[in-house]
Amino acid sequence: LELFAIADLSIDYRKSRKALSAAKEALGKFQKTGYGRGWPANCQRLRLGALDLMEQSAQAQSLGQDIMEEYRREGDLKAAADVQAGVMMSLYHECRFSAAISEGEELKEFAQGVEDPHWEGNAIIWLARINFVYRQLDQGKMLLEEARLLAQGEKDDIKEWMVLEVETRLLHEMRDYDQAFKLLDEQMELSERTGDRYRQGMSLLRRCLIWGQKETPSSSDSKNSMRAAIEAKDIFKELGDKGGEASSWDKIAQSHIIHLDDKLSDPEEALVAAETCRKLHQKKGDREREAKMMLRVMCRIHTEMGNHV
């Protein structure tokens, strides 16, 4: 039980490798002792969550299907719904949108049948997100409004934040930056009210993205982006979230890069930020993101510094 608790807590704090290790060990002990009906399936669910955090989508989907069958055999349909949500998100991350929508609609139908507003809200929000990416804008907007009404009816601040986050993404993509910033203010207010540090950090990173992607970012945009990135970095470091911390260092480097041409930024500081980000990706074993950081950011900084070789 102690190992299970460690795995569960590690998922909350996005420590994927620690969660995966503890869940595997707990699973082995439960299977060996035959302790408690349903515990092995719960351990498998945590393994799925850890794999999803590590972006190992194919493995997560395969494991998810096995876990769902196990839950259904035991008659624990709500737990099966929990896992189905994980499978849906893995399909989304792999850009298999039709399959993800199919899983989401099945999950929504199940949640409505058992009157579970938690999973109904989650399913609707994810369906809206997938529809927007899939360019089904009208369907996405309709689902988002349905999710908002459900969240407000349940007085669920986290669901409201999730609705705002999807809306902000859409406005960002449509380059409606002023309206996106207004929704980000609402997101920050909600996450501060609930003490949700992780979501505060995510809202700050979205601010950095918007400031950095303006066609002609000003020096004040760069400074604002830098401040938000540093604040996000401190939050993720406090949470032990290396992925979030790496993203924050990436944004710090990008904030420097915006003004390298007009000599308003220090390339040495930009290089330190980029190297810190690269090392965090290296520690996580994320070779793809490490390589992208070196190509997209570090090469540019070295070029600006005259280090062509």
Image (cartoon, rainbow, N blue to C red):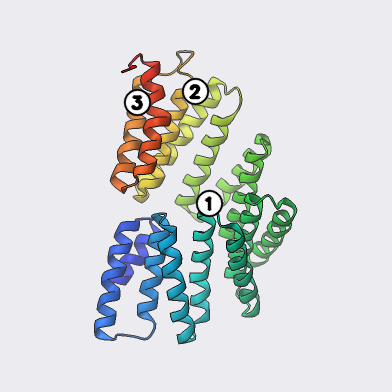
Query: On screen, 78 above or below 211?
Result: below
The earlier-in-sequence mark between 3 and 2 is: 2
Classify the position of the N terminus by image quarter. bottom left
Q: Position of residue 29 (x, y in %)?
A: 25, 78
Count of all numbered marks drawn on residues in the image: 3
Q: Residues within 10 Å of mark 1 (few under 14, many from 20)?
A: some
Q: Residues within 10 Å of mark 2 (few under 14, many from 20)?
A: many
Q: Is residue 45 found left or right of 213 in the rendered image? A: left
Query: On screen, 108 above or below 143?
Result: below
Q: Residues within 10 Å of mark 3 (few under 14, many from 20)?
A: many
Query: On screen, 271 above or below 44?
Result: above
Inspect the image, locate mark 2, and give the three-letter code of the amino acid beneath it: Ile
Q: CA distance from mark 1 to mark 3?
A: 32 Å
**Residue at the disc numbered 2:** 258
Q: Is residue 78 found left or right of 114 in the rendered image? A: left
Task: Give the foreground label among 1 and 3.
Answer: 3
Mark 1: secondary structure:
helix
Q: Is residue 293 found left or right of 125 in the rendered image? A: left
Query: On screen, 181 above or below 102?
Result: above
Mark 3: secondary structure:
helix
**Residue at the disc numbered 1:** 191
Q: Position of residue 223 (x, y in %)?
A: 49, 26
* Residue 104 visible in the current orientation: yes
For image coordinates 37% across by 49% down, the residue present is 241
Task: Give the foreground label among 2 and 1.
Answer: 2
Residue 305 — which label? Answer: none
**Residue at the disc numbered 3:** 271
Classify the position of the C terminus by image quarter. top left
Inspect the image, locate mark 1, and give the three-letter code of the amino acid beneath it: Ser
